[in-house]
């Protein structure tokens, strides 16, 4: 039996530009994809999103307004001990990054008025081969968004629905767990209630686990296999632990469950833990 070997990870961020994670690496492998878009260093709050790659902190929404949230386009301020914070009109977000026994641990605290509703996603764009797979519990309810309408083979898309829900991973006509080869499609999905996933790429595995008491947790998948944008499609794969179950806060069910809600105490705390391992006998460079 092949035993996994733990791979210590290191993280690099750029607080000047949205607190973006620019590197997540271990044993010679860089996990974060870097795009070719320019102008990331010149954005202002409210600007359209620039797909520079890395991991962006998207809050209080991903899609919708403001595009990819309010935090990515603002300068973050270092407050010591690996902590950085960003002040937005309706909330303050603090993040502390540490490296513990080879894992990267990100602890978050959002302060806002009680009742404030938000979605947060660790918008991680990963550098993966066409052979990569996303592992999640079979049967997890998975929301496919409208861009996947033409890819659903059995014609079961509900008329007028914002999404189609099917069990992971064998959604109608789409092997969602396969992250290649490039086939000219692009779709967004959310694995509802799934806070723990693994990305397997050859002998390498990356695990992302989200912990948060009392708030909805999910994982979003942006599976762009050179299908977007129409004017110049490229490959980008986003695996995004998230609080909530929708991309656009404006789509969140008012009855609850689709968005995180700040309780009476005025704060929400959560933790993202990222680990990596490699199958023994593989490439140890």
Image (spheres, grey):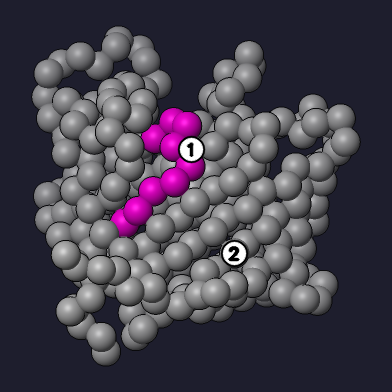
Residue positioned most to the front = 1
Question: Can you identify the residue that label 2 sits on?
Answer: 105
Quarter of the image with the C terminus in it: bottom left
Q: Residues within 10 Å of mark 2 (few under 14, many from 20)?
A: some
Residue 71 position, x and y percent, is: 67, 55
The span shown in magenta is 191-199
| Callout 1 secondary element | strand
Position of 129 with respect to 81 (left or right) is left
Residue 51, visible in the rendered structure: no
Q: Earlier in the sequence, mark 2 or mark 1?
A: 2
Residue 219 position, x and y percent, is: 44, 42
Residue found at x 67% / y 32%: 214
Position of 36 with respect to 179 (left or right) is right
In the rendered image, residue 196 lying in the magenta stretch gets the answer: yes
Question: Can you identify the residue that label 1 sits on?
Answer: 218
Mark-to-mark CA distance, 2 and 1: 18 Å
Quadrant in the picture for residue 33: bottom left
In the rendered image, residue 147 lying in the magenta stretch gets the answer: no
Residue 99 position, x and y percent, is: 59, 74
Residue positioned most to the bottom = 285
Residue 77, visible in the rendered structure: yes
């Amino acid at each position: 039996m092949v035993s996994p070997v733990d791979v210590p990870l290191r993280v690099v961020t750029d607080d000047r530009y949205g607190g973006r994670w620019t590197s997540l690496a271990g044993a010679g492998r860089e996990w974060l994809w870097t795009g070719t878009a320019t102008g990331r260093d010149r954005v202002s709050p409210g600007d359209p999103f620039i797909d520079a790659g890395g991991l962006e902190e998207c809050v209080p929404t991903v899609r919708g307004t403001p595009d990819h949230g309010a935090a990515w386009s603002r300068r973050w301020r270092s407050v010591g001990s690996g902590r950085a914070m960003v002040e937005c009109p309706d909330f303050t977000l603090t993040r502390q990054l540490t490296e513990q026994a080879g894992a990267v641990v990100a602890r978050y605290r959002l302060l806002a008025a009680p009742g404030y509703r938000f979605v947060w996603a660790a918008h991680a764009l990963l550098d993966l081969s066409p052979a990569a797979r996303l592992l999640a519990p079979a049967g997890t309810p998975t929301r496919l968004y409208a861009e996947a309408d033409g890819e659903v083979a059995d014609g079961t898309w509900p008329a007028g629905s914002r999404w189609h829900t099917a069990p992971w991973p064998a959604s109608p006509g789409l092997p969602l767990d396969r992250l290649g080869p490039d086939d000219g499609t692009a779709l967004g999905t959310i694995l509802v209630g799934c806070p723990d996933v693994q990305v397997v790429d050859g002998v390498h595995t990356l695990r992302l686990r989200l912990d948060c008491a009392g708030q909805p947790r999910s994982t979003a998948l942006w599976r762009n296999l050179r299908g977007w944008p129409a004017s110049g499609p490229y490959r980008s794969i986003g695996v995004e632990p998230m609080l909530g179950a929708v991309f656009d806060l404006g789509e969140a069910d008012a009855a609850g469950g689709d968005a995180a809600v700040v309780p009476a105490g005025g704060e929400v705390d959560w933790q993202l833990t990222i680990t990596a391992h490699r199958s023994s006998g593989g490439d140890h460079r």
